[in-house]
Image (cartoon, helix red, strand yellow):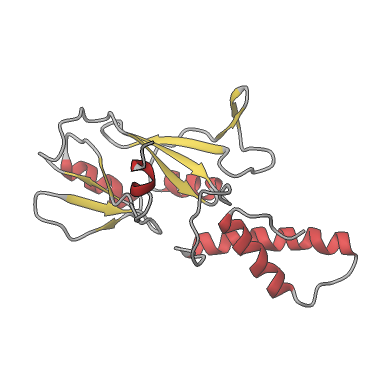
Amino acid sequence: MSTTGARLGGFDQKIEVVIVPVSDVERAKQFYLRLGWRLDATPPWVVQLTPPGSDCSVQFGDKLISAEPGSATSYVVVSDIEAARNALVAAGVEVEEIFHVTEHGPVPGLDPERGTYRSRATFKDPDGNTWWLQEITSRLPGRVGPGPAAYTSVSELAGALRRAEAAHGEHEKRTGEPDADWPTWYATYMLAEQAGTEPPT
């Protein structure tokens, strides 16, 4: 019986960079800067940018990859897809209308329950590389490894607080009394949401 999988799962493996094929490096750089992505220090023949809150970056350059410009498809995860889409449109990016996925295929509009992973929208860079916006508010079990919870941007933390506030309001309606220890309830909810475990009710 092979144990290769077990051995390879015994150490951290993190995706650091995705290479995007482009035909005009300067044009691509200006586009991604318009999205608010950080320009990183690199050798002169490489351009690297990192989205706010992301541990993974994108790179492009004249001789980095032989793939056809415009052939890449990747995901950008956001905690509030409406706010993200509005910000991109305000920056001059053409973003398709939001849709949500169902067992019967894509359906126009936000997921009615704002279910995590379900609501999406797409946009393209100047070469036609496709980016899928995907709203993720909590991770499914097993999608987050053990470790401390972390929020990587103000908007991500603010979104988590708003969801905790709404859930706590429903909690107080069910109990019929105010919860004086709401900070602990918020913290428990937010940690469970990040870990993909059952939140308090």
Who is closer to the viewer here, 133 or 8? Answer: 8
Q: Residue at x 37, y 42 (%)?
A: 5
Q: Residue at x 58, y 49 (%)?
A: 141
Vertical side of 61 occupied by 157: above or below: below
Who is closer to the viewer here, 152 or 25? Answer: 152
**Total tally of numbered discs in the picture:** 0
Relative to 90, is 31 on the left or the right? left
| Residue 91 x/y as whole percent | 39, 48
Furthest residue to the top?
104
Q: Residue at x 9, y 49 (%)?
A: 45
Q: Residue at x 84, y 72 (%)?
A: 178
Who is closer to the viewer here, 123 or 16? Answer: 16
Vertical side of 138 occupied by 191: above or below: below
- Residue 194's quadrant in the figure? bottom right
| Residue 201 x/y as whole percent | 77, 58
Furthest residue to the front?
1
| Residue 86 x/y as whole percent | 50, 46
Relative to 71, is 187 on the left or the right? right
| Residue 59 x/y as whole percent | 22, 47
Can residue 161 be spotted in the picture? no
Relative to 36, is 45 on the left or the right? left
Can residue 5 be spotted in the picture? yes
- Residue 169's quadrant in the figure? bottom right
Check the picture and name the quadrant holding the N terminus.
top left
Furthest residue to the right?
176
Relative to 51, is 68 on the left or the right? left
Vertical side of 180 occupied by 114: above or below: above
